[in-house]
Image (tube, rainbow, N blue to C red):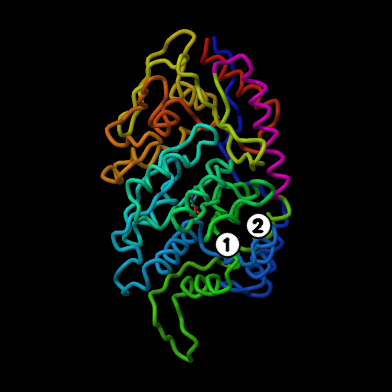
Amino acid sequence: MEKFKPFEKKIWLSSPTMHGDEQKWVNDAFEKNWITTAGENINELEKQVADYAGVKYAVALSCGTAALHLSVKLAGEKLYGQAKPNQGTLQGHRVFCSDMTFDATVNPVAYEDGEAVFIDTEPDTWNMCPKALEKAFELYPDVKLVVVAHLYGIPGKIDEIRAVCEKHGALIVEDAAESFGATYKGKQTGGFGDYAAISFNGNKIITGSSGGMFLTDSKDDADKVRKWSTQSREAAPWYQHEEIGYNYRMSNIIAGVVRGQMPYLDEHIAQKKAIYERYKEGFKGLPVTMNPFDANTSVPNYWLSCMLIDRDAMCEQVRGENKPLYVREAGKTCPTEILETLAKYNAEGRPIWKPMHMQPIYRMNPFITANGNGRGQSNAYIDRGAVCDVGADLFERGLCLPSDNKMTPEEQDVIIEIIRSCFE
Ligand SMILES: *Cc1c(COP(=O)(O)O)cnc(C)c1O
């Protein structure tokens, strides 16, 4: 007999939560007929986001990826000069990038003709490892750009990473797409990089269905990004172009949705925090840990709750290119078994983001770990008790839990029981 009943309404990983104000600002755009990539919603949202993030300027764009692309392009232009119209600004230059992230963090390096070098992850916050970054500068001392993400809403080791970058004179692009509202030493993420991006994609902490924001303290950079994002039109009576342009500006309709979400950002964070803490409490006694953070420096936005299964409690699990298999074993489990069990009961989890160095598209790119090792480790590799490829290890043993802020405590308790049953 089945122990649980499937949820009647699906429990999502992280779905949009609307409040009503969004519709009001969308209607406002309709009434004023600003159905375009300009208007009051955009102007107001840029002000509010800049205020909240503690930066001087925010430029509203079509998505977080666009904000990252223009950040990387700006950095490339600053470092290596203006490129020809048919060339990227990075032209074969290497760029150090977070390895444990969504591919939108690193793809812009390729858009600009650079080569991503992936930096392994540290186990304390699941973000870029400062030691591996230092190792990478020993191997590639010419590198001048670092692209760093804050995974799942937990700030990385910002001070350590900035110290390494300053020592080597490198610029930082900060991908705060997942961490809007998270702080490090009292300051908002998105305010640490030379250039930074946030995202309003449908599953983020607040959303416009899509949308993103470029953040900076430099008026020149903000103006440049605004110009590039609107096809690089020069001030002339006709369409005049001196530079390559993009159609990356945010729509005033989308801006209305995000504008309506802004007052609820703190509420969403509080809900996500409660979910994280309920899991933590509910998993007591199980051989698992939650995605960790340093409470002395960081206040996460708790966007996604994740768990990591102790190595001793892992049953055998093999992942091919597109399909996983596992062997059921009493007292043990694996992410595949838990995810399949959750799906059976109509709840959505997800594997940990598969590290970039394990992605077929980036299999030729260098990968640097804290001990200077890199390639040649397709699975988590243990060297005298210390994990060398931290990213592969987290991918193997970790998973993202249903983290939707509309999930009730009662529903979450059932999810916890379902997960507990996998260890039986
Ligand atoms: C969502 C996300 C992005 C991309 O944002 P979009 O708005 O979807 O383009 C970039 N980086 C990370 C880490 C993300 O999670």
Residue at mark 2: 53
Label 1 neighbour load within 10 Å: few <14, some 14-19, many 20+:
many
Q: Which residue is at 49% across, 56% downward?
A: 172
Total numbered labels placed on residues in the image: 2
User: Where does the image place residue 207, in percent across and percent down from the top left?
Assistant: 60, 52
Q: Examine the image and state in which quarter residue 289 appears.
A: top right
User: Where does the image place residue 106, in percent across and percent down from the top left?
Assistant: 40, 51
Task: Judge whether 107 appears above or below 226 on screen.
Answer: above
User: Where does the image place residue 115, in percent across and percent down from the top left?
Assistant: 32, 54
Location of the N terminus (image quadrant): top right
Residue lying farthest front? 167
Q: Amino acid at mark 1?
A: Leu
Q: Which residue is at 52% across, 54% downward?
A: 174
**Tag shown at residue 62:** none
Label 2 neighbour load within 10 Å: few <14, some 14-19, many 20+:
many
Residue at mark 1: 215
In this rendering, position of residue 242 left or right of residue 17: left
The reply to whether the magenta stretch includes residue 277 is yes
Task: Judge whether 370 appears above or below 220 on screen.
Answer: above
Q: Examine the image and state in which quarter residue 298 appears.
A: top right
Provide the secondary structure element on which disc 2 rests: helix
Q: Is mark 2 within 8 Å of ligand 1?
A: no
Q: Amino acid at mark 2?
A: Ala
Provide the secondary structure element on which disc 1 rests: strand
The reply to whether the magenta stretch includes residue 40 is no
Task: Judge whether 299 appears above or below 49 on screen.
Answer: above
Task: Kindly check if marks 2 and 1 are in contact, taking CB atoms under 8 A apart as contact.
Answer: yes
Q: Which residues are magenta?
A: 265-287
